Image (cartoon, rainbow, N blue to C red):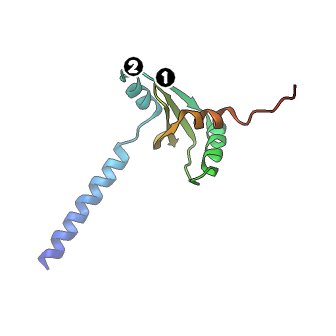
Amino acid sequence: MKIFRILAFNALIVFFNVHVSASALCDTVEDVRRSVEAWHPPGTVTEMGHDATKAFLDDFNARPPVSKFTGESMAVVDQQDSPFIILVTFEKSCAVVTMAVKRGLFMSIFNGPKEKTSI
């Protein structure tokens, strides 16, 4: 019986720590911006609104391997010398997912399909 009390107590501690951590750790766009400004050399952070985020993620998620990333908005972190763009998606103003995307892939999705012109 003593082992069950110990397990129950440990489960309660884990639940409490996870609950407190989840509510206390809400990184906002401004938190991301402050972190990026501290990089050497610093990167830039550009915010994407709801419509642009949805369009980008719809296209990104449809490409192989198929994914299911979501977000109400997104921060685009660019450090010029890096071959990657860092994307941070937000739900209710809290960071949800951070991912690194190859610069070329990001630019092809962001710029959309190019119209072919005849000469």
Task: In this rendered view, identify the residue nearer to me: 61 or 4.
Answer: 61
At a point 36% along the width and 22% down the height, the residue shown is 38
Quadrant where the C terminus sits is top right
Q: Residue at x 41, y 31 (%)?
A: 31
Q: Is residue 92 visible?
A: no
Give the side of residue 101 with respect to residue 61, left or right.
Answer: left
Q: Residues within 10 Å of mark 2 (few under 14, many from 20)?
A: few
Residue 114 is situated, as x and y percent measured from the top left of the image, at 75, 33
Q: CA distance from mark 1 to mark 2?
A: 9 Å
In the image, taking residue 90 as reference, residue 37 lies left or right, namely left
| Element marked by disc 1 | loop
Q: Please report contact status of discs 1 and 2: CB closer than 8 Å, yes or no.
A: yes
> In the displayed structure, does residue 108 sit left or right of residue 86?
right
Q: Quadrant of residue 110?
A: top right
Q: Quadrant of the N terminus?
A: bottom left
Q: What residue lies at 38% left-to-right and 28% top-to-bottom?
A: 35
Q: Residues within 10 Å of mark 1 (few under 14, many from 20)?
A: few
**Residue tagged by mark 1?**
80
Q: Position of residue 3 (x, y in %)?
A: 14, 75
Find residue 87 and report its horizontal and vertical position in percent. Answer: 50, 37
What residue is shown at x 27% (from left), y 53% (from top)? 17
Residue type, label 2: Pro
Which amino acid, by three-letter code, is at mark 1? Gln
Q: Which of the labelled discs sits on residue 41, or is there none?
A: 2
